[in-house]
């Protein structure tokens, strides 16, 4: 459920937090119960129940405080009262510049995420229209390192709750990047479809089939998955008296065996995900999922593609451990799928400038190709390449992947803004 908090603004931060808590609990108090009823009646598992809210940098801007940690704690308390798995929206949109409120929020992220359990944060640093805010990119390299340090005793878990976007969308139901955009209704129901296992099973008898025949199988499967998502969204919308927003077609993997995007690619004929041909196979999958999904719903939105989070996909984990799948190949795969360098553990001694450069690379792919890209990396404190970290639950476990040792610091320390490309001139 996406909830607008714009009417919760107040000069007094304590009053603003009180309004936020009361509104979330009022609007989403029956969300979990309703989802459980739908699960029981229709036999469709609803794995996660989540809330997204208006970016807190907008809501807290009127409040006369120097940091926004208490706003994050309020979100966490409200999420726990409602019984949801996560709440997203400790966010800021800084693609062209940072307001005072944006800077306060970004600087509050390490303490906010280390002192809460369910709060997720996202920052949009670039767009096709505006270019890339390299001052924000540089700052976020430092913030990610600080998040890792503050939760070093928990395998740097705070970093798993922070995603840095280019071309962020306002109706994304997936965490950690979900927020309720200012162009959205007062409250909406958005549904994310997670069906890699279903697609994988549909490809088990495809020996001898051509790639266009495989694309047709995936399209038909995506159609069926999306129709189920549409049914759940419509029912939840009706029962909660809330507008129906979108169905997000994204194939979101889990650590469970068989629920893997990597295994889908291997079912097409690759020996292991990450070898030559992986990008082409992923492009086929992503396109077929979109084509099948748009025939099943007139309200497709969000990210709608294939996710490739390493720690959350058992096939990706295996490929990364083998050494075949590396960060450079994942970056190439980003060009044809959703999001990007997602849930990747890197050595704890990685300089913040290198992290900023990784963010800049991904943002540039998004900016030039007019698509959403993102970075969610975890510099695992006291870990080196080849080690592993256990994050637990749907976050899985991550092999620590090497990064290039050559320095990027002079480049990222220049700051400023990478101008938007000519593609931004569309009017």
Image: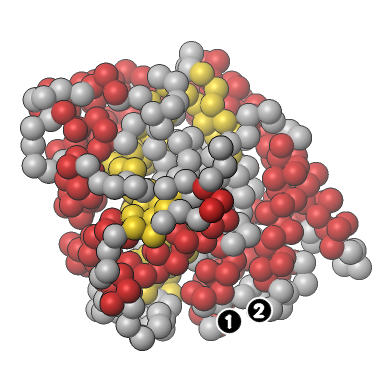
- Residue extending farthest to the bottom is 406
Residue 346's place in the image compared with 51, above or below, is: below
Classify residue 193 as left or right of residue 105. right
Q: Residue at x 30, y 25 (%)?
A: 5
**Label at residue 371:** none
Question: What residue is disc 2 on?
Answer: 275
Q: Residue at x 52, y 61 (%)?
A: 365
Tell whether label 2 touches label 1 (CB within 8 Å).
yes
Mark 2: give few (<14), some (14-19) or many (20+) Cα within 10 Å.
some
Q: Is residue 211 visible?
A: yes
SS type, badge 1: loop
Picture quadrant of residue 246: top right
Please tell me which residue lies in front, 259 or 19. 19
Residue 17: % across, % down: 17, 28
Residue 356's place in the image compared with 71, above or below, is: below
Work out which quarter of the rendered image holds the C terminus and state it.
Answer: top right
Classify residue 57 as left or right of residue 226. left
Residue 317: % across, % down: 52, 71
Question: What residue is disc 1 on?
Answer: 324
Q: Is residue 167 visible?
A: no
Residue 38: % across, % down: 56, 26
Please tell me which residue lies in front, 143 or 98. 98
Q: CA distance from mark 1 to mark 2?
A: 6 Å
Mark 1: give few (<14), some (14-19) or many (20+) Cα within 10 Å.
some
Residue 423's place in the image compared with 349, above or below, is: above
Q: Residue at x 63, y 29 (%)?
A: 299
Q: Residue at x 9, y 25 (%)?
A: 12
Work out which quarter of the rendered image holds the N terminus and state it.
Answer: top left
Residue 122: % across, % down: 35, 48
Classify residue 176 as left or right of residue 220. left
Picture quadrant of residue 412: bottom left
Picture quadrant of residue 83: top left
């Amino acid at each position: 459920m996406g909830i607008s908090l714009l009417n919760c603004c107040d000069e007094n931060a304590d009053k603003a937090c009180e309004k936020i808590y009361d509104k979330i609990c009022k609007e989403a108090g029956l969300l979990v119960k309703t989802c459980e009823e739908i699960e029981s009646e229709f036999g469709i598992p609803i794995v996660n129940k989540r809330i997204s809210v208006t970016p807190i940098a907008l809501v807290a801007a009127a409040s006369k405080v120097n940091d926004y940690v208490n706003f994050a704690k309020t979100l966490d308390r409200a999420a726990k009262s409602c019984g949801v798995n996560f709440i997203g929206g400790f966010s800021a949109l800084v693609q062209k510049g940072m307001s005072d409120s944006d800077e306060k929020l970004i600087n509050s992220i390490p303490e906010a995420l280390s002192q809460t359990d369910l709060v997720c944060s996202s920052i949009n640093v670039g767009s096709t229209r505006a270019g890339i805010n390299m001052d924000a990119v540089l700052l976020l390299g430092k913030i990610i390192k600080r998040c890792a340090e503050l939760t070093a005793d928990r395998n740097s878990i705070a970093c798993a709750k922070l995603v840095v976007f280019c071309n962020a969308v306002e109706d994304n139901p997936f965490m950690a990047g979900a927020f309720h955009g200012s162009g959205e209704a007062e409250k909406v129901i958005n549904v994310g479809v997670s069906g890699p296992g279903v697609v994988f099973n549909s490809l088990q008898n495809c020996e001898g089939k051509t790639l266009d025949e495989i694309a047709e199988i995936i399209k038909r499967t995506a159609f069926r998955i999306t129709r189920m998502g549409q049914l759940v969204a419509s029912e939840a919308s009706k029962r909660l008296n809330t507008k129906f927003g979108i169905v997000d077609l994204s194939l979101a993997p889990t650590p469970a065996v068989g629920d893997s995007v990597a295994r889908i690619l291997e079912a097409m004929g690759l020996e292991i995900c990450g070898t030559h041909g992986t990008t082409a196979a992923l492009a086929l999958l992503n396109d077929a999922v979109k084509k099948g999904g748009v025939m099943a719903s007139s309200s497709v939105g969000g990210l709608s593609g294939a996710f490739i989070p390493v720690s959350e996909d058992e096939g990706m984990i295996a490929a990364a451990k083998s050494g075949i799948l590396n960060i450079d190949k994942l970056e190439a795969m980003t060009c044809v799928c959703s999001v990007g360098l997602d849930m990747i553990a890197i050595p704890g001694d990685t300089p913040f400038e290198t992290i900023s450069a990784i963010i800049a690379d991904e943002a540039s792919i998004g900016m030039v190709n007019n698509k959403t890209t993102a970075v969610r990396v975890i510099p695992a404190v006291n870990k080196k390449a080849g080690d592993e970290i256990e994050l637990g639950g749907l976050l899985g476990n991550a092999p620590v992947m090497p990064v290039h040792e050559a320095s990027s610091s002079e480049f990222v320390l220049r700051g400023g803004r990478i101008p938007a490309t000519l593609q931004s001139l569309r009017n």
